[in-house]
Image: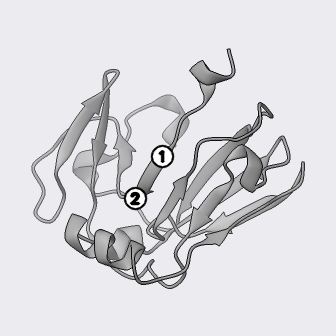
C-alpha cells in the first residue's frame, strides 16, 4: 500500500484559480476543466495577490518527501525552459515541518515533492487566500455570495 500512495510532484508553480464558469477575458487563460470544475490562469497581478497556508496534520521531513522550494522564484510566471534552468542553478530548500506547523508561501514559488523514503503520512490542509475581486463575468451567483 505504501508504494501505491507514494508519488513525486515535479518542480512547478501553482498558477490557476477555480471559477464557477468560463468566460473570454483578456489576460485570463489558458482554461481547463478538471472533474467538472473550471480552472484558469489569471494575470500575474492577480496571482501576486494570492497566499497559501499549508496546515500540516503530520510531520514532514526529507524522508517522507517534504515540500521543497527554490527561493526567490515567486515574482513571475515561468516557462518550462526557465524552470529547468532555475532547478539546476538554485539550491532547493527542504521545508521540514512538525504536526500543527503552518507553512505560508506564495503559490508562484517553484516547489516540488520527492517520493517518500519512509511510509509516514504527509497530510496537509492547503488553503489559498486572494486579496482581489473576480471580474463580474466570473463571479459566483449564489445565496452565499451576498
Left or right, residue 115 beside residue 134: right
- Which of the 4 image quadrants contains residue 51? bottom right
Vertically, is 1 above or below 97?
Answer: above
Q: Is residue 77 visible?
A: no
Vertically, is 76 above or below 22?
Answer: below
Vertically, is 126 above or below 45?
Answer: above
Vertically, is 70 above or below 115?
Answer: below
Rounded to the nearest whole Å, what is the CA distance between mark 2 and mark 1?
8 Å
SS for dot 2:
strand
Foreground pick, 127 / 145: 127
Question: Quarter holding the N terminus?
Answer: top right
| Residue visible at 54% across and 70% down in the picture | 106
Q: Label 1 near label 2: C-beta < 8 Å?
A: yes
Foreground pick, 123 / 53: 123
Foreground pick, 144 / 128: 128
The residue wearing badge 2 is 12
The residue wearing badge 1 is 9
Image coordinates of residue 77 in percent, x first then y, are: 29, 72
| Residue visible at 67% across and 41% down in the picture | 116
- Disc number for residue 65: none
Amino acid at each position: 500500500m505504501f508504494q501505491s500512495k507514494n508519488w513525486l510532484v515535479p518542480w512547478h508553480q501553482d498558477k490557476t484559480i477555480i471559477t464557477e464558469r468560463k468566460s473570454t477575458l483578456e489576460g485570463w487563460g489558458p482554461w481547463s476543466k478538471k472533474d467538472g470544475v473550471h480552472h484558469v490562469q489569471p494575470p500575474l497581478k492577480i496571482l501576486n495577490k494570492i497566499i497559501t497556508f499549508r496546515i500540516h496534520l503530520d510531520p514532514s521531513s526529507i524522508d517522507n518527501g517534504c515540500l521543497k522550494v527554490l527561493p526567490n522564484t515567486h515574482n513571475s510566471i515561468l516557462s518550462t525552459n526557465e524552470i529547468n534552468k532555475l532547478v539546476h542553478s538554485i539550491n532547493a530548500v527542504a521545508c521540514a515541518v512538525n504536526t500543527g506547523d503552518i507553512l505560508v508561501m506564495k503559490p508562484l514559488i517553484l516547489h516540488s515533492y520527492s517520493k517518500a523514503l519512509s511510509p509516514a503520512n504527509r497530510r496537509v490542509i492547503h488553503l489559498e487566500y486572494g486579496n482581489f475581486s473576480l471580474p463580474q463575468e466570473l463571479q459566483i451567483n449564489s445565496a452565499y455570495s451576498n
